[in-house]
Image: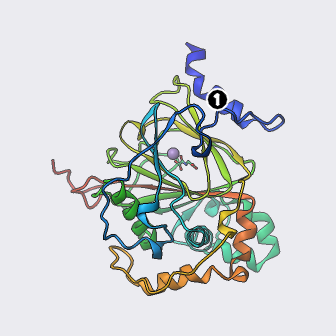
């Protein structure tokens, strides 16, 4: 009984090893699909007129490559649909803006830093103490790590740009009624891990969970509904979007290891986006968004963020909390 229960933990401990590097020969990734576990999906019938991609730092939807996993129905990987400049934009957002108050972050209990990024760059002392202590920021409905319950009084506006990005991705996969209502931004350093868990706090467990990865790579373990299932290990690289839907939505998962990426694609060939001001669903000022995206082509502007991301990984985990016909947690469920 004990050994069966430990299948997930066994894999976690194996990949977590530091003294001796774990073998990555069984880690699944698109570029080296030796075991035929990963299958490319045909292009879905997305809305061809959705022209919001460029301004959100995404490649044209017709160029996205999407995969599923033989042993994990409901798990979908979109292999880096971001442009290089787009990766810079989102990395910067996660560092400079999302950790600002009133959003919540793990270091709030220790020190009041309303603007963590700015504080770290204004004082060497704060930087040395606080920079690598940031492990998470929450957006929208704030995840309560103790009770695991969301609360109407614990909600701040969800970032417009991230809502728009999530809408494009969800629509592309056919989840047309998805609404981004809560997100956890996870910050990982080279020795960070995330232990085995399921994400079950949301009222709506039918809606998919969208997980965006940026920066250094990660080994992601995904198992079954209990820890008895031995998990698969998948390599998540910068720009990758992992979608946990249907049967995969409530499966155990973890991040036992961060590994240096092969290429820092965010520093490769960059091009600005011009004359593209599409109709947006959530973003009010698309001109400003375009300017903010293009700003990052300047390596001087980018340099502080580059220093951070060269030894870190950022994961943005977006969820819908409410059912389609609900506007708040307290509003009666209409069935
Ligand atoms: C989470 C999560 C996975 C990752 O935030 O719940 O599972 O890839 N993150 O960092
Ligand atoms: Mn999770």
| Nearest the eye: 293 or 5 | 293
Residue at x-position 34% and y-position 53%: 44
Relative to 236, say whether 99 is above or below. Answer: below
Task: State the image quarter where residue 60 is shown.
Answer: bottom left
Residue at x-position 31% and y-position 71%: 49
| Residue sitting farthest toward the top | 1
Q: Position of residue 195 (x, y in %)?
A: 61, 39
Mark 1 beta carbon near ligand 1 (under 8 Å): no
How would you rate the neighbour count of disc 1 (Cα within 10 Å): few for under 14, some for 14-19, many for 20 or more?
Answer: some
| Nearest the eye: 100 or 288 | 288
Callout count = 1
| Nearest the eye: 148 or 163 | 163
Q: Position of residue 326 (x, y in %)?
A: 24, 57
| Residue sitting farthest toward the right | 19
Q: Position of residue 51 (x, y in %)?
A: 37, 73
Relative to 111, say whether 256 is above or below. Answer: above
Relative to 257, say whether 293 is above or below. Answer: below
Q: Dot 1 lies on which element?
A: helix
Q: Is residue 195 visible?
A: no
Mark 1 highlights which residue? Answer: 11
Task: Tell me how the rendering is colored.
Answer: rainbow
Looking at the rendering, in which quadrant would you find the N terminus? top right
Residue at x-position 41% and y-position 62%: 62
Q: Is residue 179 visible?
A: yes
Q: Position of residue 8 (x, y in %)?
A: 58, 28
Residue at x-position 60% and y-position 22%: 6
| Nearest the eye: 184 or 175 | 175
């Amino acid at each position: 009984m004990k050994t069966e229960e430990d299948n997930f933990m066994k894999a976690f401990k194996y990949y977590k090893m530091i003294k001796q590097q774990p073998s990555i020969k069984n880690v699944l990734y698109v570029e080296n699909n030796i075991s035929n576990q990963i299958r490319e999906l045909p292009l879905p019938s997305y809305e061809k007129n959705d022209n919001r991609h460029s301004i959100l730092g995404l490649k044209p939807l017709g160029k996205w490559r999407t995969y599923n996993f033989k042993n994990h129905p409901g798990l979908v990987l979109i292999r880096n649909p971001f442009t290089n400049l787009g990766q810079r934009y989102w990395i910067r957002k996660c560092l400079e803006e999302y950790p600002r108050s009133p959003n919540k972050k793990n270091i709030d209990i220790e020190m009041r830093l309303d603007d963590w990024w700015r504080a770290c760059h204004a004082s060497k002392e704060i930087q040395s103490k606080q920079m690598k202590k940031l492990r998470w920021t929450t957006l929208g409905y704030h995840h309560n790590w103790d009770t695991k319950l969301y609360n109407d009084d614990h909600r701040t506006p969800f970032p417009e740009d991230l809502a728009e990005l999530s809408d494009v991705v969800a629509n592309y996969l056919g989840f047309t009624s998805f609404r981004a209502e809560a997100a956890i931004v996870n910050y990982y350093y080279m020795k960070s891990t995330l232990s085995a868990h399921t994400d079950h706090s949301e009222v709506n467990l039918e809606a998919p969970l969208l997980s965006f990865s940026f920066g250094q790579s990660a080994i992601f373990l995904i198992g079954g509904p209990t820890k008895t299932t031995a998990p698969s290990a998948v390599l998540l690289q910068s720009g990758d979007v992992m979608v946990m839907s249907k049967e995969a939505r409530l499966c155990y998962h973890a991040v036992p290891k961060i590994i240096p990426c092969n290429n820092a694609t965010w520093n490769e060939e960059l091009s600005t986006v011009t004359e593209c001001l599409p109709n947006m669903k959530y973003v009010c000022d698309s001109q400003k968004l375009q300017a903010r995206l293009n700003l990052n082509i300047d390596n001087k502007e980018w340099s502080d963020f580059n220093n951070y991301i060269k030894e870190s990984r950022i994961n943005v985990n977006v969820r819908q909390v409410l059912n389609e016909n609900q506007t708040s947690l307290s509003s009666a469920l209409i069935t």
